[in-house]
Every structure is written in C-alpha cells, then in structure tokens.
Amino acid sequence: MKKIYEFRTDEEKYMIVNMNPNEKKEAFEINKKDSKKYAKIIEYIEKQMTKGNLSVKKDMMPVIKYQPEGSEKELPLYVASSIVSEISPLLLVLKSGINFNAMIIEEPEAHLHPELQQKMARLLINMMNLGIPVWITTHSDTILQHINNMMKLKNHVRSSELQKEYGYRKEDLLSREDVQMYQFVPDNNGKTHLEALEATKYGFVVPTFNNALEKIVEEVYAFQED
C-alpha cells in the first residue's frame, strides 16, 4: 500500500512517498546509509541557501534549532527567516536518513529570491540524479528556465568547457527523457484542462509563462522615456 507522509510549514507542503508495497521498513526508519547518500546535497543547502545548520534537539517534544553560519548561538526555528523555515522540512528529511521512494513539493520557490530559486532547481535536479523521482508544482519561470538550461547544457557541443566556466558538475545536468511538464489551461467554459508540454531543442515552452513575460517586456519599452 502506498504511504504518504506530510511535512508542513506555514504555507508549503512537502510529501514523502513510499510507493513500494513490499517495503517492510517503516518509511520514517532512520537509515544512516541514505543520510550519507545525500551528504553533498545537505552541504549545498546549508552553505548556499540556509547559510547555517539545522538540527533537532530532544526535549519533552523535539525542538528544531537553527545555527547561523559563523555563530555559536542556536535559535529556535520560529525566529529564523522565512527562507530557512520553508527549506527546513526538505533539509531535515534528507539529514534524517528517512527511507523514501519519491518526493512531491508544492511551490518550491515560495519565499525564495530568484537567485535562491535557481539554487533550489539545482538541488532538485541533483536529487533526481540520485534516482529520486521528484514532482513539483510551480509558478516560477526561474525554476523552469534553469531546468531548460541544464537540458541544453547536457547536450551542448561545448558542455565540458561551459560546465567549468559556470561552475556546474555532471550531477547538475538533466536528460530530456527524465523530465515531463504539464500546464493547467482554462477554457471559455470555466473549466481547466491539463496539457502535456513538448520539449524543443531549447527546452520546454510554457505559453502561460511566456505570454505574461512578453506583456511585461512590452510595457517596459512602451513606458520608457527617451
């Protein structure tokens, strides 16, 4: 039977899915081997995104503590920034060594600056390349563009050279056959349909994103004074 476990923050929900019906272990069983498997991703999150360490302290009830980089003081999670609190469920799951088969993340870009949205997309791709199916819903053109960029970089004739120039590694790249995208499209009858998107040599084209961005760019030039 499929098991779904939820980790909630104020506005975002992470779901850890155990889809193996023959799995005898509890999905929350600590697995040190799996924890080590994610070591590079954990280090990336703490150094590049949360800028500090998260840990769970045992008390009458478990308490999540955040220790900023370069500080000896530990802070309760509720006084940390929204960036830290939103990323914390993902980070804590990876650090725990929980045995899971897939991850579903709603709006991974929530509360993240565009630079951090790109880094979020990078770590999601890293997770996929470790063999973890990742499903997301997003309104972020930044995340979408990074996914497209990594698909193009993988097949680029100068891939190795460009990886060195822009600081990417093999695990940051993405194969076209490993990705599928869909968009929700409203019709004139007030109903919404799910449409599969086709990938071109430039990546996935999302009309609902592109139309909005083109309108903004058009206004930029229209309202600009000479």
Image: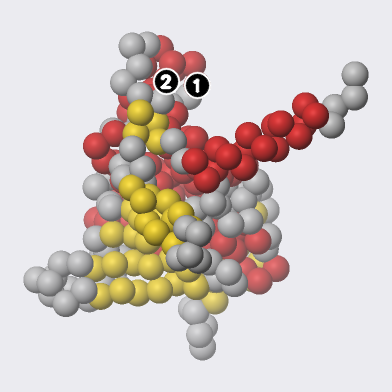
Residue 170 at what x, y percent from top left?
33, 28
Q: Determine which of the numbered discs, if any, sits on residue 166 in the image.
A: 1
Q: Could you give the CA–CA distance between mark 1 and mark 2, rounded to whole angstroms?
A: 5 Å
Q: Foreground: 120 or 107?
A: 107
Quadrant location of the C terminus? top right
> Residue 92, position in %: x, y?
45, 63
Residue pictured at 43% horizontal, 16% vertical: 162
Q: How many residues crowd around disc 2 within 10 Å: few (fewer than 14), some, or many (20 or more)?
A: some
The residue positioned farthest toward the front in the image shown: 189
Residue 190 position (above or below residue 160): below
- At horizontal 63% and vertical 56% (from top left) the residue drawn is 111
Query: Residue most toward the right?
Result: 226
Residue that carries the numbered disc 2 in the rendered image: 163
Q: Position of residue 132 (x, y in %)?
A: 27, 52
The single residue placed furthest to the bottom in the displayed view is 60
Marks 1 and 2 in Cβ contact (< 8 Å): yes
Specify the amino acid type for callout 2: Gln
Residue 26 lies in what quarter of the image?
A: bottom left
Say what amino acid the circle numbered 1 marks. Tyr
Secondary structure beneath disc 1? helix
Q: Nearer the viewer, residue 6 or 81?
A: 6
Q: Quadrant of residue 2?
A: bottom left
- Of residues 147 and 216, the one drawn nearer to the viewer in this rendering: 216
